Image (tube, rainbow, N blue to C red):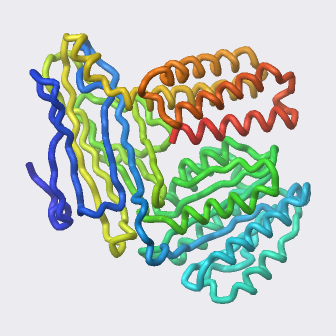
Amino acid sequence: MKFSKRLLHMGVFFLVLVVMGGSNTVAIAEVSTNRSYTVAWDVQVSHPYVQKGRYADEFLNIRLSGREGVPLIARARVNLVLVIDRSGSMSDRGKIDYAKGAAKEIIDRLGSNDRLSIVAYSTEVQVLYPMQFLRNKELAISAVNSLYPTDSTNLSGGLITGINQLNSVRESGYINRVILLSDGLANKGITNIGELSRVSSQASERNIQITTMGLGLDFDENLMMSLAQHGAGNYYFIESPSQLASIFQREFGQLSRTVAKAPVITITLEPGVSLQELYGYTHSTTSDGKIRIKLGDMFAGQQRDILMKLRVPAERIGERGLVKIYLDYEDLLNDNQRAGFEKELAYNVTSSEQKISENQNQDVMTRAVSVYAASNLHKATTEYENGNSAGALTYMNNAYQKIMKVNQTPQRNQQTLKQQEELREAIEDMEASASSPMSDSGKKLIKEQKAKAFEYQQ
């Protein structure tokens, strides 16, 4: 087997996953760059054996874990842009004052080796504090204090200006983050979700992450979730302005514990294998047909599950190649060096139903059910949003039954138990609610359930 020179220089060893045709033994491919890992990974398929036929479905789950329990001598340095909505609606319920307070708390936590910029947007966009090292906190706080609500919501102008602030100072070893806060609908500048998502995706390709915070009940959650997903960042639904400070603290806490920057998963599908669905993440396809998944920076103790559904050829009995997977990231615990893992997976076509059932990976199937339930929750919310409460309940009950069935087996876990309880509560709320989707209680229900669905798919 051939290795690239770059992997050899990294001290990588490589074993191939082989599913033996006449045995139940599965050898897992594993690669390690060093003994003291920063990101661990575990890659598993749902069915090492699939039923002979024209095609079969296969779930593939990639689990990444940021190293925890490690003393961080110094946290990663940050290039941070706060992009704050100052449209007229920010005067309601003291939103602008809470936003100011949250921004000041972030400023207090940043150090002199961090860079900060503050951008405010309404109809016009204004850079209140140009990107610079935070050597004068009083000046930054003065910029925050100058915020006042006015006019419309040029969200695209604020986002693009914030990204451009970071483009001027890109540097290895820094975490680059835009935090975009909005309480209303984008009604000036670019308003199309697809176009705005492309802006966010292009920023992600330059190792700039976009975190979005939707405040109140009148913002477009579909837009804010899409920006976060394409920008490899986080999405928060913040119902009350009083929650802003704690959400800002949570986001900064993740920034300060970052251990791996700009991880990218590249997947080569073997001939005949096709990607049917990637859940909770976006991907691009390279010129040579490889699938490329750009992930957000990982912090200590974080776990990510990337689940995808593949369709595989199953006409010929025997072993077949499935995928080659490569993970690459900047290791902030090891002098910002590039690090990586590589793995090959195979599957086996059989006519033995016993082999299929005995070797089915229950952990991956549990993950698939959890994601399916999250997808149904999102569909239910869309049905309710469109005025079809009966259809919404059908989707919710279906998801609830699937999760409950998993939780009656040893494969239950903390997430599926929590998901079952939240689905039960959502069903009760839906059954008891006579509210219009356009009422405050209806808007709250929609935003809460979409946020939960977004979270569970990742």
Residue located 72% across and 58% down the image: 181
Residue located 52% across and 37% down the image: 414
Q: Is residue 78 above or below residue 139?
A: above
Q: Is residue 261 left or right of residue 200?
A: left
Q: Quadrant of residue 94?
A: bottom right
Q: Nearer the viewer, residue 47 or 311?
A: 47
User: How many circles with numbers are drawn on the protein?
Assistant: 0
Q: Quadrant of residue 173?
A: bottom left
- Residue 248 pos. (x, y %): 68, 62
Residue located 45% across and 49% down the image: 303
- Residue 272 pos. (x, y %): 25, 28
Q: Is residue 175 above or below residue 51?
A: below
Is residue 386 at all visible to an observer of this figure? Answer: no
Is residue 97 at all visible to an observer of this figure? Answer: yes
Q: Is residue 107 left or right of residue 19?
A: right
Q: Nearer the viewer, residue 360 or 418?
A: 418
Residue located 77% across and 26% down the image: 429
Q: Nearer the viewer, residue 434 or 317?
A: 434
Q: Is residue 294 above or below residue 248?
A: above
- Residue 116 pos. (x, y %): 63, 77
Q: Nearer the viewer, residue 443 or 19?
A: 19
- Residue 241 pos. (x, y %): 81, 56
Q: Quadrant of residue 455?
A: top right
